[in-house]
Amino acid sequence: MPDHVRHDNDVCGQVCCQLCRVPTLVPHAIVDSFSATPKLQALVVRWLDDVKNLRRLSPHTLAAYAADMHSLLQFMVAHGGKIPCLDDMFSLSLMDWRAWLASLSASNGARSRMRRLAGVRHFFKWAEVKGYGKNPHLSYLKNPRVDKTLPRPITPDAATAMLHMAGQQKNPWQHARDQLLLLLLYGAGLRISEALGLCWRDVVGQSQLVIVGKGNKPRMVPLLPALQQAVSDFYQAQPATPQAMAPVFKGARGEKLHAGVVQRLVRQWRRQLGLPDSVTPHALRHSFATHLLASGADLRSLQELLGHASLSTTQVYTKIEDIALQKTYFATHPRARR
């Protein structure tokens, strides 16, 4: 891997870590470390400030936008041999743009490159609307081709087996914790970050959750009776009455539980049950959606439950159902066996 690409990855990771640890951190401190003239740095800061305030972006998304611009600026230093200025940004040729995308391919998949390009496009569109300048060649750059892969849900029997496996913990506290975690992922369709972001005030005595997910958009998620019971069991298993704003799922030092802990647990359970590697915490969310759709849920309701901004994102689950229907037909219809 080229040195400038390796350095870019390291710094981009640091950017994400800084913004995720300190949600109120202003972008100025991040952009000051970028290789650009003061005027260009100031413009990137203004853009990040605007998208942060106007679009109410999460710290993760803001960090990603900052990392996108850092990637481009680092490439311009390596490619042009000097610190880039505003004129350099707006005069990048189509060959320059293609070379930047090619430099990313060594360490990023097509989906990551497309997401990075989307962040940079947003900056240039913003700069054009604000009257700071325009790059006439960026619009001719094609997006990287991304192979669409369907979500891989698990069967209802496998989900039940995982819940049973989680319930075999000898420690009552861990037993209750693992049961609640799995039920939030499979029984409520939460993202792992959403489940781990819950505090006790959100769940105790509640019949539904108010989840603020991607894009800081709130959505209502009903709590099934089994989930309400799991909340009560875990609450009762606490060694002391937890504070209302304390995280439901805590790590060893009292901080919010890390997603890696949940991923390791699911990996352990799937190995014990002989399930494929595709069984992950997020696969449980896919399973929630797929099983609801198979039971007659409509797409609009499913979109609301999952917190998808676009219905097209939810429609991917209908393709899974179509494939399952075809398999059932060819396996059971008398004429299909001939």
Image (cartoon, helix red, strand yellow):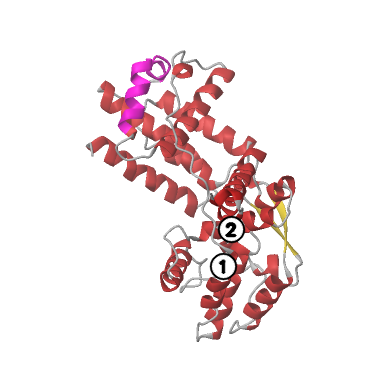
The dot on residue 159 is 1
Crowding around mark 1 (Cα neighbors within 10 Å: few <14, some 14 to 19, many 20+) is many
- Figure quadrant of residue 310: top right
Magenta stretch bounds: 86-103
- Figure quadrant of residue 245: bottom right
Rendered view: 124 above or below 219: above
What kind of element bears circle 2? Answer: helix
Position of residue 174 in the picture relative to residue 202 (left or right): left
Q: Nearer the viewer, residue 54 or 206?
A: 206
What kind of element bears circle 1? Answer: helix
Point out the tag, 1 or 2, that comes first from the N-terminus.
1
Q: Main secondary structure of the magenta part?
A: helix
Q: Nearer the viewer, residue 13 or 144?
A: 144
- Residue 179, horizontal then vertical, whole percent: 58, 74
Q: Amino acid at mark 1?
A: Ala
Residue at the spot 60% in from the left edge and 63% down from the top edge: 186
- Residue 230, horizontal then vertical, whole percent: 65, 75
Position of residue 198 in the picture relative to residue 26 (left or right): right
Q: Is residue 31 visible?
A: no
How far separated are the C-alphas under marks 1 and 2? 8 Å
Q: Is there CB contact under 8 Å for labels 1 and 2? A: yes
Rendered view: 126 above or below 179: above
Residue at the spot 41% in from the left edge and 35% down from the top edge: 113
- Residue 251, horizontal then vertical, whole percent: 48, 71
Is 331 within the magenta?
Answer: no
Q: Which residue is mark 2?
A: 287
The dot on residue 61 is none
Q: Nearer the viewer, residue 92 or 312?
A: 312
Q: Amino acid at mark 2?
A: Ser
Is 102 within the magenta?
Answer: yes
